[in-house]
């Protein structure tokens, strides 16, 4: 998934850290032109191969020392409408990559998601919170995690990091790479950006009757560059051969929809018209991380503020986003 939202930010950081990444993507959800922006930021061409992570022959030909697996569909609503596409793309490709890891004795960093916690029994969420899934997207993440744990038990020599993302937002400070969803955005931040830019008429706020301070949904938004530095910390940890390790990548702070909207308006000096509508099926009221395990074991914590997130998201909308 190297030409995706997280993949492009990972390529920039890997080059900055002295790695020599190879970018592989099937271009199902992205465009190779983003690699021109990556080249402008990191000052060098990144080798690119068009291939599908589920294509065993292609993966055999490409396999490198490390795999960082960003190749996943991630729209909850789309996963409900097209579950087989999600199981084929997300789960099938993970099996291929796991087979390659065992064959080549390679380590893996897997992008999981806070969605595997289902409806929180307690907050903040720790890594030992019970796991469940409430939609096909979340089930693919949960099934891949369970498969990884089974493989790690059977193969103690296999080193793998499972990173549970909370809500990735923001963009590289250059404004040259960022989240570029096709069509109408599912996620809050791109929709807020497009509303502020006049591309969307108004933001629909999905419910204001939750048991939260202002009634709107609370999430743990994390700047994409903090998420990426968490991957670098995990890569370095894998060099110590820890087996299977699992960490939350969140800030530990909960922010409501309206808090996000008002912060976005205040920091960027723009207006985001919105209307309160019915709850979105499948949404939980609140979801935010206890990130202390990642700090203790990986020496990582998020450093970007909410103001950084809304500022960088808007900069990307103005400079780079093609909506
Ligand atoms: C955030 C809040 C909505 C849109 C999902 C996946 C998760 C991760 C991120 C990949 C909620 C509200 C949203 C809108 C709104 N996926 N909202 N109006 O659902 O927390 O997480 O995306 O990395 O695994 O589950 O993110 O941005 O869709 O919603 O009011 O138009 O914003 O109700 O409270 P979510 P989101």
Image: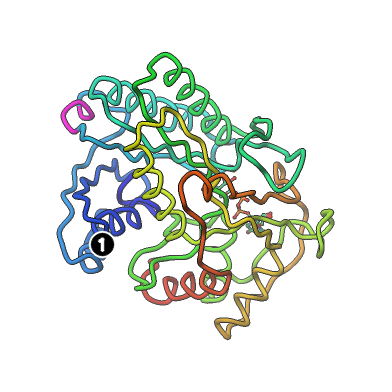
Residue 218, x across and y down, in percent: 71, 57
User: At x 43% / y 21%, what residue is drawn?
Assistant: 152
- Nearer to the camera, 203 or 230: 230
State which region is magenta: 58-62
Which one is in front, 312 or 188? 312
Residue that numbered label 1 is attached to:
38
Colouring method of the image: rainbow
Rendering quarter of residue 276: bottom right
Which quadrant is the C terminus positioned in?
A: bottom left
Residue 53 on the magenta segment? no
Point 20% across, 29% down: residue: 58
In the picture shown, does residue 57 fall above or below 313? Answer: above
In the picture as drawn, the residue positioned furthest to the bottom comes out as 269
State the image coordinates of residue 130 (x, y, percent, origin top left).
68, 31
Percent across and percent down for residue 220 are 62, 56
Residue neighbourhood size for the residue with mark 1, other residues' Cα within 10 Å, grouped as few (<14), some (14–19), many (≥20): many
Which residue is located at x 31 percent, y 58 percent?
13
């Amino acid at each position: 998934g190297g030409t995706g939202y997280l993949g492009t930010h990972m390529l920039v950081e890997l080059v900055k850290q002295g790695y020599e990444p190879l970018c592989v993507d099937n271009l199902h959800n992205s465009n190779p032109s983003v690699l021109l922006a990556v080249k402008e930021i990191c000052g060098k061409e990144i080798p690119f191969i068009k291939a599908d992570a589920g294509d065993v022959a292609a993966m055999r030909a490409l396999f490198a020392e490390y795999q960082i697996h960003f190749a996943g569909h991630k729209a909850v609503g789309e996963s409900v409408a097209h579950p087989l596409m999600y199981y084929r793309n997300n789960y099938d490709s993970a099996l291929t990559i796991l087979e390659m890891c065992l064959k080549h004795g390679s380590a893996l960093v897997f992008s999981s998601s806070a969605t595997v916690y289902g409806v929180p029994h307690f907050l903040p969420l720790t890594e030992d919170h019970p796991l469940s899934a409430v939609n096909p997207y979340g089930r693919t993440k949960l099934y891949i995690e369970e498969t990884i744990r089974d493989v790690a038990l059977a193969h103690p020599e296999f080193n793998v990091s499972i990173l549970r993302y909370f809500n990735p937002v923001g963009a590289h400070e250059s404004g040259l790479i960022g989240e570029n969803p096709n069509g109408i955005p599912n996620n809050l931040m791109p929709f807020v950006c497009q509303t502020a830019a006049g591309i969307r008429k108004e933001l629909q706020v999905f419910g204001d009757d939750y048991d939260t301070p202002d009634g709107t949904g609370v999430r743990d938004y994390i700047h994409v560059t903090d998420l990426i530095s968490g991957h670098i910390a995990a890569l370095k940890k894998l060099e110590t051969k820890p087996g299977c390790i699992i960490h939350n990548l969140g800030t530990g702070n909960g922010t409501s929809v309206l808090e996000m909207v008002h912060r976005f308006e205040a920091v960027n000096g723009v207006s985001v018209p919105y209307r309160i509508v019915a709850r979105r099926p499948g949404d939980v009221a609140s979801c935010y991380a206890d990130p202390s395990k990642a700090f203790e074991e990986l020496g990582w914590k998020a450093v970007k503020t909410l103001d950084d997130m809304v500022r960088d998201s808007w900069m990307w909308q103005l400079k780079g986003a093609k909506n």
